[in-house]
Amino acid sequence: MPKKDTLFTFLNQIQNKRRTVPYDKKIANAYMISMWLSHDKALINKVNDINKYQFILPDEVIYEYYMSAVPQGKRYLKWVKKRKEDVQMKKRITKLQDHNPTLSVRECKMILTYLMNRKKT
Protein backbone atom coordinates (compact mmCIF):
# COMPACT_ATOMS: atom_id res chain seq x y z
CA MET A 1 0.00 0.00 0.00
CA PRO A 2 1.52 3.37 -1.01
CA LYS A 3 2.35 5.87 1.71
CA LYS A 4 -0.12 8.75 1.97
CA ASP A 5 1.30 12.25 1.50
CA THR A 6 0.95 14.66 4.42
CA LEU A 7 2.06 18.15 5.36
CA PHE A 8 5.30 16.62 6.63
CA THR A 9 6.03 15.17 3.18
CA PHE A 10 6.21 18.69 1.77
CA LEU A 11 8.10 20.12 4.76
CA ASN A 12 10.70 17.39 4.26
CA GLN A 13 10.92 18.21 0.56
CA ILE A 14 11.64 21.85 1.43
CA GLN A 15 14.30 20.86 3.97
CA ASN A 16 15.94 18.23 1.76
CA LYS A 17 15.66 20.18 -1.52
CA ARG A 18 14.44 16.96 -3.13
CA ARG A 19 11.04 16.66 -4.76
CA THR A 20 9.59 13.20 -4.36
CA VAL A 21 5.96 14.12 -5.10
CA PRO A 22 4.42 17.14 -6.85
CA TYR A 23 3.13 19.89 -4.57
CA ASP A 24 -0.55 19.62 -3.62
CA LYS A 25 -2.06 22.63 -1.90
CA LYS A 26 -5.02 20.56 -0.69
CA ILE A 27 -2.69 18.50 1.48
CA ALA A 28 -0.31 21.27 2.59
CA ASN A 29 -1.49 24.80 1.97
CA ALA A 30 1.00 27.67 2.11
CA TYR A 31 -0.39 28.98 5.39
CA MET A 32 0.32 25.69 7.19
CA ILE A 33 3.80 25.44 5.69
CA SER A 34 4.56 29.00 6.78
CA MET A 35 3.22 28.32 10.26
CA TRP A 36 5.44 25.26 10.65
CA LEU A 37 8.57 26.89 9.26
CA SER A 38 8.09 29.91 11.54
CA HIS A 39 8.75 27.65 14.54
CA ASP A 40 12.44 27.60 13.54
CA LYS A 41 14.16 30.78 14.74
CA ALA A 42 16.66 30.58 11.90
CA LEU A 43 13.86 30.72 9.32
CA ILE A 44 11.62 33.36 10.91
CA ASN A 45 12.97 36.19 8.70
CA LYS A 46 12.40 34.18 5.52
CA VAL A 47 8.85 33.41 6.61
CA ASN A 48 8.23 37.07 7.47
CA ASP A 49 9.49 38.16 4.05
CA ILE A 50 6.79 36.17 2.26
CA ASN A 51 4.14 36.47 4.97
CA LYS A 52 2.83 39.83 3.72
CA TYR A 53 1.97 38.13 0.41
CA GLN A 54 0.51 35.01 2.04
CA PHE A 55 -3.06 35.54 0.84
CA ILE A 56 -2.20 37.36 -2.39
CA LEU A 57 0.16 34.91 -4.08
CA PRO A 58 -0.89 31.41 -5.12
CA ASP A 59 0.19 28.63 -2.78
CA GLU A 60 2.44 27.16 -5.47
CA VAL A 61 4.49 30.38 -5.67
CA ILE A 62 4.99 30.47 -1.90
CA TYR A 63 6.01 26.80 -1.94
CA GLU A 64 8.57 27.53 -4.67
CA TYR A 65 9.89 30.46 -2.61
CA TYR A 66 10.45 28.16 0.35
CA MET A 67 12.10 25.54 -1.89
CA SER A 68 14.65 28.15 -2.99
CA ALA A 69 14.99 30.26 0.19
CA VAL A 70 15.18 27.65 2.96
CA PRO A 71 18.67 26.21 3.37
CA GLN A 72 19.04 22.45 3.08
CA GLY A 73 19.24 20.54 6.32
CA LYS A 74 17.12 18.62 8.79
CA ARG A 75 15.26 20.62 11.40
CA TYR A 76 13.25 19.67 14.42
CA LEU A 77 10.02 21.65 14.30
CA LYS A 78 8.14 21.07 17.52
CA TRP A 79 4.39 20.56 17.37
CA VAL A 80 2.60 22.89 19.76
CA LYS A 81 0.19 20.82 21.82
CA LYS A 82 -2.71 21.80 23.99
CA ARG A 83 -1.71 22.61 27.51
CA LYS A 84 -3.15 20.66 30.38
CA GLU A 85 -4.79 23.86 31.67
CA ASP A 86 -6.71 24.24 28.40
CA VAL A 87 -8.20 20.76 28.78
CA GLN A 88 -9.09 21.45 32.41
CA MET A 89 -10.70 24.78 31.45
CA LYS A 90 -12.84 23.03 28.86
CA LYS A 91 -14.04 20.54 31.48
CA ARG A 92 -14.88 23.38 33.86
CA ILE A 93 -16.80 25.21 31.14
CA THR A 94 -18.83 22.09 30.38
CA LYS A 95 -19.59 21.61 34.07
CA LEU A 96 -20.66 25.25 34.42
CA GLN A 97 -22.89 25.02 31.35
CA ASP A 98 -24.48 21.85 32.73
CA HIS A 99 -25.57 23.85 35.79
CA ASN A 100 -26.63 26.87 33.75
CA PRO A 101 -27.26 26.09 30.04
CA THR A 102 -27.95 29.75 29.17
CA LEU A 103 -24.29 30.69 29.65
CA SER A 104 -22.14 31.00 26.56
CA VAL A 105 -18.58 29.68 26.39
CA ARG A 106 -17.24 33.23 26.54
CA GLU A 107 -19.29 34.01 29.63
CA CYS A 108 -18.11 30.80 31.30
CA LYS A 109 -14.48 31.69 30.58
CA MET A 110 -15.00 35.13 32.09
CA ILE A 111 -16.59 33.68 35.22
CA LEU A 112 -13.92 31.02 35.65
CA THR A 113 -11.09 33.49 35.07
CA TYR A 114 -12.59 35.83 37.66
CA LEU A 115 -12.96 33.01 40.17
CA MET A 116 -9.42 31.73 39.63
CA ASN A 117 -7.94 35.24 39.99
CA ARG A 118 -9.99 35.82 43.11
CA LYS A 119 -8.79 32.54 44.55
CA LYS A 120 -5.13 33.55 44.04
CA THR A 121 -5.46 36.76 46.06
Image: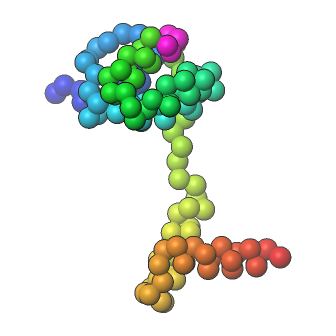
Asked whether residue 70 is drawn in magenta, I would say yes
User: Is residue 92 shown to the viewer in this render?
Assistant: no
User: Residue at 38% across / 32% down in the picture?
Assistant: 56
Q: Which color scheme did the rendering employ for the protein?
A: rainbow
Which residue of the protein is positioned furthest toward the left in this rendering?
A: 1
Q: Nearer the viewer, residue 66 or 4?
A: 66
User: Residue at 25% across / 18% down in the picture?
Assistant: 22
Q: Main secondary structure of the magenta part?
A: loop
Asked whether residue 54 is drawn in magenta, I would say no
Q: Quadrant of the N terminus?
A: top left
User: Is residue 60 shown to the viewer in this render?
Assistant: yes
Q: Tell me which corner region of the image, top left, top right, bottom left or bottom right, holds residue 25.
A: top left
Which residue of the protein is positioned furthest toward the right in this rendering?
A: 121
Q: Nearer the viewer, residue 2 or 56?
A: 56
Which residue of the protein is positioned furthest toward the bottom in this rendering?
A: 99
In the rendered image, residue 80, in percent from the top left (x then y), is placed at 54, 43
Q: Quadrant of the C terminus?
A: bottom right
Counting the numbered discs, the total is 0
Region of the chain picked out in magenta, as a range: 69-73
User: Residue at 74% across / 74% down in the picture?
Assistant: 117
In the rendered image, residue 111, in percent from the top left (x then y), is placed at 61, 80
Q: Is residue 60 above or below residue 97?
A: above
In the rendered image, residue 88, in percent from the top left (x then y), is placed at 56, 67
User: Residue at 53% across / 63% down in the picture?
Assistant: 87
Judged left or right of residue 23, residue 107 is right
Q: Tell me which corner region of the image, top left, top right, bottom left or bottom right, holds residue 7.
A: top left
